Every structure is written in C-alpha cells, then in structure tokens.
Image: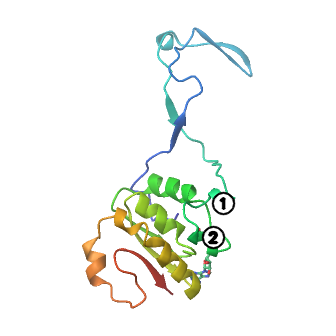
Amino acid sequence: MFFKGVPKTFNAITEPTKSAGKKIKAFRITQEGRGNVPAEDIGRQIKTERKASNIFTYNVGTSSATDRIAFRHPAIFPERLAEDQIATWTNERDVVYDCFMGSGTTAVASCNLRRNFLGSEISEEYVEVANERLIMYRHKIKPLSVIETSYTMPTVANGNAAALLT
Ligand SMILES: C[S@@+](CC[C@H](N)C(=O)[O-])C[C@H]1O[C@@H](n2cnc3c(N)ncnc32)[C@H](O)[C@@H]1O
C-alpha cells in the first residue's frame, strides 16, 4: 500500500471481542494482578467488536482462491488477504491498482468488493490467466465510464477490471 500524505480512507477491520455482551465488573484480573475498574464503567456492556491487530492469519494452499484457474500461477496470495486490505483502504467504486498482478487475485477481490481495478503483469501467460479468471467476477462491478471510454490498449479486457500487459 502506498500513500501520498495521510490515507484518505481507513475502514478498520474488526473482530469479535472475547467477552462480547457481558457486563463490566468492579475489578479485572490482569497479568499485573487485580485492578479496580473506574466506577463509571461498572455494569456497562462490553463491546461486541474491536479493531483487529495488525497481524493477520490466513489459510493458504487450496483454500486461497475460490476458483481453480488461479492455481495456474505458482505464487498466488489468498483472496481474503487482498479483500481485507482493499476494504480497509478504499471505498466502493474507488480504483485499485496492482503492479504485480499475477493471476489477478487483487482484481478478483476488487470485483467482489465493488471496486474498479487496473493491473500490470510482465508475463503474457499470467495476463491470460488473470483475464480468464476475471470473466467470472467482472459482472459484480458497474463499469466506470471514464476508464471504459478512455482506454485503448489492445491487451485490455472489456470492462473496467482489466489486465494490462506491461
Ligand atoms: C508473487 S506474484 C503475484 C501474485 C498475485 N498476488 C496473485 O495472487 O496471483 C508476482 C508477479 O509479478 C510479476 N512481475 C515481476 N516483475 C514484473 C514487472 N516488472 N512488471 C509487472 N509484473 C511483474 C511476475 O510475473 C509475477 O506474476
């Protein structure tokens, strides 16, 4: 992820809290020992969600991708990883660019989350893999007219989720 200045979007990833729904008691036991809770917090409902940490765990291997075409590339990353990052740093209809697109995982994740997508890939073989893969996902996003009408490179697939040959 590259930013110029402060990111314009930050949608924090959240995860369920361990004690979701329970009420805050008068004291809590921590590694340091027993600590009193401020009076105004006692009895308050514990939040059901909290911000996820910045260490993520993903399944790899055959569950990395929801289609089989992706596995014609030897080094795909999990769709879920791409989805989490795209959801955090962009909003619907933003444009996501991946300069090392490989099998097009970032493009797939962008389509699933209704983001527009551009990518570059040096290998013609993998551009074909990505374009073939994207046929199944492109319908999920509405074409972004400015990209559709202005783009003329012959290697661009129809629509705005396009694989470019660099
Ligand atoms: C680790 S793979 C990316 C895999 C991708 N994230 C996926 O899930 O399929 C890196 C890709 O970058 C491509 N690549 C390497 N140098 C490049 C360059 N200068 N321009 C564009 N693509 C390049 C490689 O061909 C390779 O497919």
Point out residue 159 in the picture as x, y percentages from the top left corner. Answer: 34, 76
User: Toward the viewer: 53 or 35?
Assistant: 53
Point out residue 92 in the picture as x, y percentages from the top left corner. Answer: 35, 57
Q: Is residue 14 above or below residue 141?
A: above
Residue 71, numbered circle: 2
Residue pictured at 52% horizontal, 34% vertical: 50
Q: Secondary structure at mark 1?
A: helix
Mark 1 closeness class: few <14, some 14–19, many ≥20 residues within 10 Å: few
User: Toward the viewer: 55 or 134?
Assistant: 134
Say which amino acid is labelled 2.
Phe
Q: Is residue 55 above or below residue 146?
A: above
Residue pictured at 50% horizontal, 80% vertical: 120
Residue pictured at 40% horizontal, 54% vertical: 9
Residue matched to label 1: 62
Q: Ligand 1 within 8 A of label 2's CB?
A: no
Residue 135, numbered circle: none
Residue 60 is left or right of residue 98, and the answer is: right
Say which amino acid is labelled 1.
Thr
Q: Earlier in the sequence, mark 2 or mark 1?
A: 1
